[in-house]
Image (cartoon, rainbow, N blue to C red):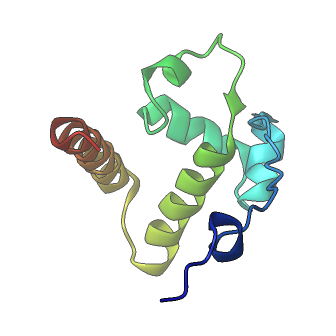
Amino acid sequence: MNKTSFHENYSLASVSIEVVEPRAYSLEATARLANVHPEMLRYYCQLGLFGEARTQSDVELIFDDDSVYELRRFEHYRQHHNVNRRTLRLMCSLWHEVERLKMELRFLRGT
């Protein structure tokens, strides 16, 4: 029987992981990234599509990459599937509920 040492079977590799800080975008920058008029984005905020904190008119609107993704998703459904803005509000609340339930399920499963 051929016995091999630990060093012959396994090798170590050094991996460098870059930590990226979350990005923050202004209302204008977010609208430009999603190819949406800034007033449309402001309207979506007033509808509560981005959470209750952004429904206030006196709050400075700052968005992150997830918000840009959601905005693009809203616009996709509105433009390509003729979903009206009121229905977007319902769809958005359902998407958030599904995400909350997924997180709860992961927690309960212990993963």
Instruction: Give percent across and percent down for residue 79.
Output: 51, 73
| Residue 40 visible | no
52 in relation to 79, above or below: above
Q: Nearer the viewer, residue 70 or 105?
A: 105
Q: Is residue 39 left or right of residue 88?
A: right
Residue 78 in the image: above or below residue 90: below
Residue occupying image coordinates x 25% and y 44%: 106
| Residue 88 falls left or right of residue 32 | left
Relative side of 1 to 39, left or right: left
Residue 7 in view, yes or no = yes
Residue lying at 53% horizontally and 53% vertically, measured from the top left: 70
Residue 9 drawn at (x, y percent): 63, 75
Q: Nearer the viewer, residue 33 or 4?
A: 4
- Is 33 placed above or below 49 here? below
Q: Position of residue 62 (x, y in %)?
A: 71, 28
Residue nearest the viewer, comparing 61 with 67 = 67
x and y, in percent, of residue 49 in the image? 44, 39
**Quadrant in the picture for the C terminus:** top left
Q: Residue furthest top?
A: 58
Residue at coordinates 83% horizontally, 44% vertically from top-left?
29
Number of marks in the rendered image? 0
At x 23%, y 39%, the residue is: 110
- Residue furthest to the front: 1
Q: Quadrant of residue 14?
A: bottom right
Image quadrant assignment for residue 22: top right
Judge by depth and name the residue closer to the eye, 103 or 67.
103
Q: Residue furthest bottom?
A: 1
